[in-house]
Each structure stands twice: as structure tokens, then as C-alpha cells.
Image (cartoon, grey):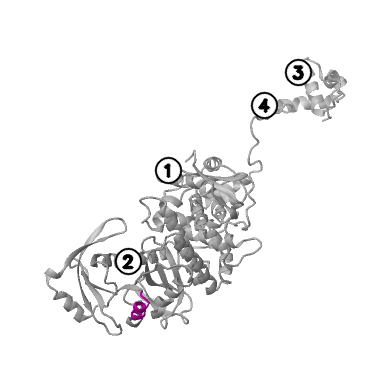
């Protein structure tokens, strides 16, 4: 077709067509409309007579076969089709064949840089004839997604460019944790630490990648799981997506115990300055199983599995009021486990310039020896622990008259209480210089009597029992670390040095505690409950010039989330290009 110029003669355009299609149209018009014979049309247009007959024949055939108009193409109103080559449709159908839901497919496409709506994905699936997926619980859904994503190629993690874009996330609620990281200076503590970094992944992006993974309740790591395709989890660390499994293993291999203990000391200072540590610390051991060659490892009792197994024994310290974990150590062996309580004191008092308010240590009967209890007493540290029940002690308790017992109410974390019977006396013990206070506790005949020993003589008996009952919370926290923060899941695709794994578990746990404290009525909830009610929220994330808008999907606790997050609208995040994050309710479900 010839080009039309500004000086084109408009009459000549119609009388002297230069386009072959235009000439054919005028020839057929003469034949059908004006009634010219084939010879007359041929003479006028310059075609051969046979060509005219062929054009007439083909034109009639096109009309009979209902083909598109051969001369005039109707312009389609609206945007051009998203998938002109059919490549996106092929991907969507392929993902659906692997039993991925619409939101899962959206996240996978976002990670590949393909931005289409969930409505478009749904229409594509519907038009392809797929039935609705059956309802699945969380465990089954995760298992199906893990299997179906085995052949997906996750993108390479890199620092986010922060250009305007929109993407979806199954864990958009994870971003609600970010303000608490900044407000308590955890980001500065990470930057000032000696953890490794690379040109592509900064120190804070590296550590927050671990925190994001720990906080996501992923039960098993695999090399190509959907967690390394979720753009929202990547944004948490200032990245496009989280790194792959191999990176996590190689990163932890370069970290020493000194680096971890130095970071824990820096965090300890933050908890003290924030008023999150009371005058009491609960101490306990936990066994972290090792599923490889057990030759270098000792057998330790695992309360979760109710048996002794080859494992690494770790010590954990927790504040009973805030639930903050302030200490962790995986270098405990049988030869030095009795001295862990003294090592914790050295850790707590490592900064002499800061006033320590630590007054009470609470632990069980196997945590240390009577000789070390004597050392604590000399350091003016009050202790509360359980004395082991011997046959003579049990007989002595049974012989105590009913009039000597007092009923004491013990409050639980949820505000409820239970009643126990208690009485006390002062005794002398071998290996301990001074007299010691001994408190007997028994229930309604369903539990065996317990014996608390302490060097605290000023507090009432009820207060002592309450203080020790709070120690049972640390056992709950340890179980939580094993279940939610997957502390002992080293049999999975990521092999992480256990001391670093414990340090990251402590960090993730404490961020969860900070978050829970902001929600009245939920501060006592464990990490799994907080995750289910507040963190596991799907959302759409819009990256703007200076603000990131997170539109959260409908959820029962969404009003509470939005009210709490509104107080941090002006907060900026250095590793996220100094941008602020605002949360809003999405208009679609």
C-alpha cells in the first residue's frame, strides 16, 4: 500500500488507486454494483479477463465460508490482548495442572515479571475447562504446592529496583513486622554486627531473609519451594525474592559463635533499654536433634520425643513477663552444663556501664548443682528451683497435717487461675552454706507434690509459687521454636549451622513478641496463633515513587491490623530505599 502524503490529491486517491487491495475492491464494485461485464472491468482496471473471473469466484467463496471481510478490517475498541502469543495462557494452564490455586499462580507469574490479574487467571482456567480445586487444610495445601512447584525455576534474588510496579503476596501480612524492627533499632543492630554480606545482598537483607523464612511457618525447606517466589517475602528483606536454599546453607557456614554471641549482646542491650526485661530470667535446656552421623554428639533427653537421642543441647533464657528470649547457647556439653547458669550471668553483666536489674533466676532441678546455687547466693542473685523428690521427702510431705496447708491461686497467661495447696519450712542442705527456704506444693491428688527451694525469704509464699509457675512458659517457648520456627528441622533441604539457627529463631521469636504486644488481648498468644490471625494475609502490593501501599485481603482481624499499622504510616525503612509503607483494605476478596 502506497503512503499518503500531506499533498495527496484526494480525488486522485479514489480515481487512481495505488494499493492492489484498493484496485481489486473498485474492480469488484464495478462488476457487482455497476453491472459491468468482466471484459469492461478488465479493460478499465488493467486486469486480464481471467483474473476478474478468479477475483469474483474467490470473493463469493469468502462470503459463503463466513471469513473475515477481505477488504475492511474492523478496529477493536479497548486495550490490546494481554497474551497475543498465548505464552501466558500456556503457563497458567501448566501451573493449574500442578494443582496450584489462582493466588499461587499469581505469585508465580509475578516472580517471573508477568503482571496479570487474578480475574484474568481465573477466566483462563475456566475457559480451559478446569474444575474448582477441592477444599484443603493448611498442611495439605502446603504439601501440594511444594510438590507442584518442584519443577518451577525461581528467579535469582537481587536488590529490588523499587520501580513502580504491582504484585501479589500470600504473606503480605509479614510486612506488618517491619515497623517493630525499626522502632527498636534491630535494623541498626544488624548493620553494626559482623555478619557477612556481599555486593548484591547487604548484611540486613541477608539476616532479614532468614527472619522472613523463620516467620513464615514453612514446615519444610526445598530447593524450589514457593517461598522463594513470593515477592512480598522478598520485599521484607529489600529483595525481589528470597534467595534459594543453597544460599542459606552457604551463608551460615561462614558464621562463628563469637559473631552470634556479640549480636545477642547487642539485642540484649536493646531489650534492657526498651524496658522489656524484668528482674527475673527463666532458664532451661532443649535438645536439638541431629539426623546425621551421631558420633560427635552426646545423648540428651528430648521432652518433645520423650526419649534420649543424639543431639545438641542448647540453653535458652526468657523473660517471664514480656516473653522475650534474651540468651541462647548451643555449646552446652555434659561436662559444662552445670555451669551454664554462671555463664548466663557473665553474659547478662557483660556491660558494666549498664545497670542490671536481674534479681531472680528460675530453673528446674537438673539445671545446676547445689554448689553453684551457693555461688549464686554469694553473688546476691536470688534463685528459684525444684528439688528432686526422694522417698523420704515424699513420706515427709504425706505426713504434713492438713491444717498446715494453705490454698494458693496461681494465675495463667490467659488470665485464668488454678488452686494448689502449699506449705513451707527452712532447712539446711549439703553443699549449700546458708539456710534455704523450702516450699511444698500439691494439687488435688492428680499430680505428684513439687518442692521449690529458694534463697528468697522476703516474698510471700504465693508470690514465689507464681514466679516459678511462670517458668513453665519457657518450656512452651521451646516447643514453639521446634514447631513454628522449625529450630530442629535440619533434615530439610537447607543445612544451617545450629548456633546461627538458634540465634535467628530467637530474633524471629522476639520480633513476634514485639508485634503481639501491640494488640490488646493477644499479647499472650503464641507465634502460631499470631501468624494465623495477623500474618497470613494475602494482599496486593503497589510500589510507588516514595510509598509502598499494601492492600490486605478481607480477614476477621483486619480492622485491628489497619488500626495498629496506621500509627507507623510515616515510618521509613532504610533497606527498602528509605520508603514508607502504608496498609489498607483491598476492595476485592
Q: Position of residue 320 (x, y in %)?
A: 36, 63
Q: Tell me which numbered mark, 1 or 3, is placed earlier along the sequence.
A: 3
Q: Tell me which numbered mark, 4 or 1, is placed earlier along the sequence.
A: 4
Give the residue at mark 2.
Answer: 472
Give the residue at mark 1.
Answer: 559
Q: Give the dominant element type of the magenta stretch: helix, strand or loop.
A: helix
- Would you say 322 lies left or right of 547 here? left
Magenta stretch contains residue 222 = no
Q: Is residue 536 visible?
A: yes
- Would you say 352 lies left or right of 155 here? left
- CA gap between label 4 and label 3 equals 16 Å
Residue 564 position (above or below residue 17): below
Give the residue at mark 4.
Answer: 64
- CA gap between label 2 and label 1 equals 33 Å
Label 3, secondary structure: give it.
Answer: helix
Label 2, secondary structure: give it.
Answer: helix
- CA gap between label 1 and label 3 equals 71 Å
Question: Callout 1: 10 Å neighbours few (<14), some, many (20+)?
Answer: few
Cβ–Cβ under 8 Å for marks 3 and 2: no
Q: Tell me which numbered mark, 2 or 1, is placed earlier along the sequence.
A: 2
Q: Position of residue 120 (x, y in %)?
A: 56, 40
Give the residue at mark 3.
Answer: 32
Q: Position of residue 98 (x, y in %)?
A: 52, 53
Residue 379 placement: quadrant: bottom left
Q: Depth check: 553 or 465 in front?
A: 465
Magenta region: which residues?
372-380
Cβ–Cβ under 8 Å for marks 2 and 1: no
Label 4 or label 1, whichever lies nearer to me, is: 1
- CA gap between label 4 and label 2 equals 85 Å
Q: Depth check: 60 or 513 in front?
A: 513
Amino acid at each position: 500500500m502506497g503512503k499518503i502524503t500531506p499533498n495527496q490529491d484526494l480525488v486522485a486517491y479514489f480515481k487512481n488507486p495505488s494499493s492492489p487491495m484498493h484496485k481489486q475492491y473498485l474492480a469488484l464494485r464495478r462488476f457487482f454494483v455497476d453491472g459491468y461485464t468482466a471484459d469492461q472491468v478488465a479493460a478499465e482496471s488493467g486486469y486480464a479477463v481471467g483474473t476478474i473471473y478468479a477475483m469474483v469466484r474467490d470473493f463469493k467463496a469468502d462470503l459463503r465460508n463466513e471469513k473475515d471481510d477481505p477488504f475492511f478490517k474492523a478496529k477493536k475498541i479497548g486495550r490490546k490482548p494481554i497474551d497475543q502469543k498465548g505464552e501466558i495462557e500456556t503457563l497458567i494452564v501448566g501451573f493449574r495442572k500442578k494443582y496450584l490455586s489462582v493466588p499461587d499462580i499469581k505469585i508465580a507469574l509475578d516472580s517471573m515479571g508477568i503482571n496479570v490479574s487474578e480475574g484474568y487467571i481465573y477466566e483462563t482456567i475456566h475457559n480451559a475447562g478446569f474444575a474448582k480445586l477441592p477444599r484443603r487444610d493448611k498442611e495439605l495445601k502446603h504439601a501440594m504446592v511444594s510438590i507442584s512447584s518442584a519443577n518451577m525455576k525461581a528467579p535469582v534474588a537481587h536488590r529490588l529496583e523499587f520501580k513502580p510496579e504491582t504484585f501479589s503476596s500470600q504473606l503480605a501480612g509479614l510486612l506488618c513486622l517491619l515497623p517493630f524492627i525499626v522502632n527498636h533499632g534491630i535494623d541498626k543492630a544488624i548493620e553494626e554486627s559482623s555478619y557477612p554480606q556481599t555486593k548484591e545482598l547487604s548484611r540486613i537483607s541477608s539476616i532479614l531473609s532468614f527472619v522472613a523464612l523463620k516467620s513464615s511457618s514453612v514446615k519444610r525447606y526445598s530447593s524450589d519451594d514457593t517461598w522463594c517466589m513470593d515477592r512480598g517475602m522478598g520485599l521484607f528483606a529489600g529483595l525481589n525474592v528470597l534467595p534459594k536454599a543453597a544460599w542459606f546453607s552457604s551463608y551460615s557456614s561462614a558464621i562463628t559463635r563469637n559473631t552470634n554471641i556479640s549480636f545477642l549482646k547487642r539485642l540484649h542491650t536493646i531489650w534492657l533499654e526498651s524496658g522489656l526485661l524484668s528482674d527475673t530470667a527463666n532458664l532451661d535446656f532443649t535438645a536439638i536433634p541431629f539426623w546425621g552421623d551421631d558420633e560427635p554428639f552426646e545423648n540428651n533427653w528430648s521432652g518433645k520425643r520423650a526419649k534420649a537421642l543424639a543431639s545438641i543441647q542448647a540453653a535458652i533464657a526468657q523473660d517471664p513477663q514480656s516473653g522475650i528470649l534474651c540468651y541462647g547457647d548451643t555449646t552446652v556439653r555434659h561436662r559444662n552444663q552445670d555451669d551454664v547458669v554462671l555463664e548466663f550471668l557473665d553474659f547478662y553483666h557483660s556491660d558494666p556501664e549498664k545497670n542490671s536489674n536481674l534479681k531472680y533466676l528460675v530453673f528446674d532441678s537438673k539445671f545446676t548443682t547445689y554448689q553453684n546455687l551457693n555461688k549464686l547466693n554469694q553473688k546476691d542473685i536470688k534463685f528459684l528451683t525444684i528439688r528432686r523428690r526422694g522417698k523420704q521427702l515424699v513420706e515427709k510431705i504425706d505426713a504434713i497435717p492438713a491444717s498446715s496447708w494453705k490454698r494458693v491461686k496461681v494465675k495463667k497467661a490467659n488470665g485464668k487461675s488454678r488452686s494448689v495447696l502449699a506449705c513451707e519450712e527452712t532447712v539446711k542442705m549439703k553443699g549449700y552454706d546458708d539456710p534455704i527456704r523450702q516450699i511444698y506444693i500439691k494439687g488435688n491428688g492428680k499430680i505428684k507434690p513439687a518442692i521449690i527451694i529458694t534463697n528468697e525469704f522476703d516474698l510471700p509464699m504465693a508470690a514465689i509459687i507464681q514466679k516459678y509457675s511462670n517458668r513453665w512458659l519457657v518450656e512452651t517457648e521451646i516447643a514453639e521454636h521446634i514447631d513454628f520456627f522449625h529450630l530442629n528441622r535440619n533434615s530439610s533441604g537447607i543445612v544451617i549451622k545450629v548456633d546461627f539457627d538458634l540465634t535467628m529463631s530467637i530474633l524471629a521469636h522476639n520480633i513476634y513478641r514485639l508485634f503481639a504486644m501491640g494488640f490488646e488481648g493477644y499479647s499472650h498468644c503464641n507465634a502460631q496463633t499470631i501468624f494465623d490471625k495477623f500474618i497470613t494475609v494475602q494482599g496486593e502490593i503497589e510500589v510507588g515513587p516514595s510509598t509502598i501501599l499494601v492492600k490486605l485481603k478481607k480477614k476477621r482481624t483486619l480492622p485491628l491490623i489497619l488500626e495498629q499499622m496506621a500509627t507507623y504510616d510515616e515510618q521509613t525503612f532504610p533497606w527498602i530505599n528509605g520508603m514508607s509503607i502504608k496498609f489498607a483494605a483491598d476492595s476485592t476478596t
